[in-house]
Image (spheres, rainbow, N blue to C red):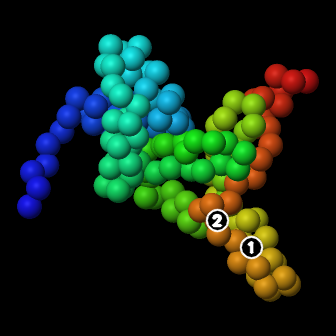
Amino acid sequence: MAKEYTTKVKTWLMDYFHEHSEERNSAKDISVKMKKDGLVVNLSTVYRNLEKLVEEHVLSFEEIPGMEERKYVLHKPEMECSHHLHMHCVKCGKVFHLNCSFMDEIAHHLNEEHGFVIDCEKSVLMGLCEECRKEEE
């Protein structure tokens, strides 16, 4: 059995994601933030640690259409992301959980009328959030 131990990188990642639980960051974003905190780490080490935290169900990731990199976020089992869609603001990058009964109606309609079942965990609606839309007005 392999020995479990916590590295500086893993500790930093855990602290960061718990303090910024709503933020989504790529490995490159995280690397830059680590450097600002004085922790200089090879990018491949950042990727390896992020993927390990995903395997441990500490982090989740989102693959947003049109974006090259995965965005990592603190895993929240209570959100049940496999049961609702997500909205991604193309301006600020925030991702919102669309967890309302109206989406159940849409999913039901698509299944009944079109024989199509939505893969909610991988489905993202692209647009502008309320805050960014107000900035543009």
> Residue 35's quadrant in the figure?
top left
Q: Is residue 137 above or below residue 103?
A: above
Q: Nearer the viewer, residue 44 or 38?
A: 44
Give the residue pinned by disc 1. 107
Which image quadrant for residue 19? top left
| 106 to 85, vertically: above or below | below
Residue at 77% x, 47% y: name it: 126
**Which of pointers 1 and 2 lies earlier in the amino acid sequence?**
1
Q: Secondary structure at mark 1?
A: helix
Element assignment for label 2: helix
- The foreground one among 33 and 79 is 33
Amino acid type, residue under disc 1 in the picture: Ala
Task: Identify residue for label 2.
Answer: 120
Residue 51 visible in image: yes
Q: Residue at x 87, y 24 (%)?
A: 136
The image shows residue 27 at horizontal and vertical percentages of: 47, 35
Above or below for 125 versus 134: below
- Amino acid type, mark 2: Cys
Give percent across and percent down for residue 80.
51, 62
The residue depicted at 35 percent of the width and 56 percent of the height is: 55
In which quadrant of the rendered image does the N terminus lie?
Answer: bottom left
| Residue under the image location 58 percent in, 42 percent down | 69
